[in-house]
Amino acid sequence: DLHTDIGKIVHAGYILTFLAALVAMWPNWRATGWAFTLAVLGTIQAFLAGGDMSPGVHAFHAMLAPVVFVIAVVIAFRAWTAIRATPAVAV
C-alpha cells in the first residue's frame, strides 16, 4: 500500500531529524526539544496506524497529522533562520 510505504519513509525522516538535532546541538540537549517531540508524536502516529483501526483511533491518528506538520515547519523555520544568521565563511 502506497500510504503505508510513504508513512514508513516519513517516520524514518522524523527519527533522522531527531538524530541530526542531537549531533548538531551537542551537548545543548534543550535545543533538541522540538525534534524530540516530532519523533515521539510521529512514532505514536505510526503505531496508531498499524492494524485495524476503530473510528476513534483513526480520528486520533488523523488529528496528529497537522500537529506533526506544524512541528516540522517550526523545526525547518528555526533551522533556516539559524543558517541565515550565520556569517558566510570565505574559502
Image (cartoon, rainbow, N blue to C red):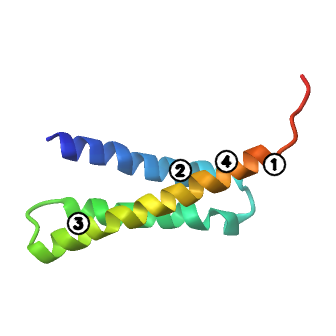
Amino acid on which disc 1 is placed: Ala
First along the sequence among labels 4 and 2: 2
- Quarter of the figure with the C terminus: top right
| Labelled pair 4, 1 in contact (Cβ < 8 Å) | no
Q: Residues within 10 Å of mark 2 (few under 14, many from 20)?
A: some
On the image, the x and y values in percent for residue 46 come to 28, 59
Disc 4 to disc 1, C-alpha distance: 9 Å
| Labelled pair 2, 1 in contact (Cβ < 8 Å) | no
Disc 4 to disc 3, C-alpha distance: 31 Å
Q: Which residue is mark 4?
A: 80
First along the sequence among labels 3 and 2: 2
Give SS at disc 4: helix
Looking at the image, is mark 4 or mark 3 nearer the viewer? 4
Disc 1 to disc 3, C-alpha distance: 39 Å
Looking at the image, is mark 2 or mark 1 nearer the viewer? 1
Asked where in the image residue 77 lies, by quadrant, the reply is bottom right
Which numbered dot is residue 17? 2
First along the sequence among labels 4 and 1: 4
Q: Residues within 10 Å of mark 4 (few under 14, many from 20)?
A: few
Disc 4 to disc 2, C-alpha distance: 14 Å
Which numbered dot is residue 85? 1
Q: Which residue is mark 3?
A: 48
Query: Which residue is located at x 25 percent, y 67 percent?
Result: 61
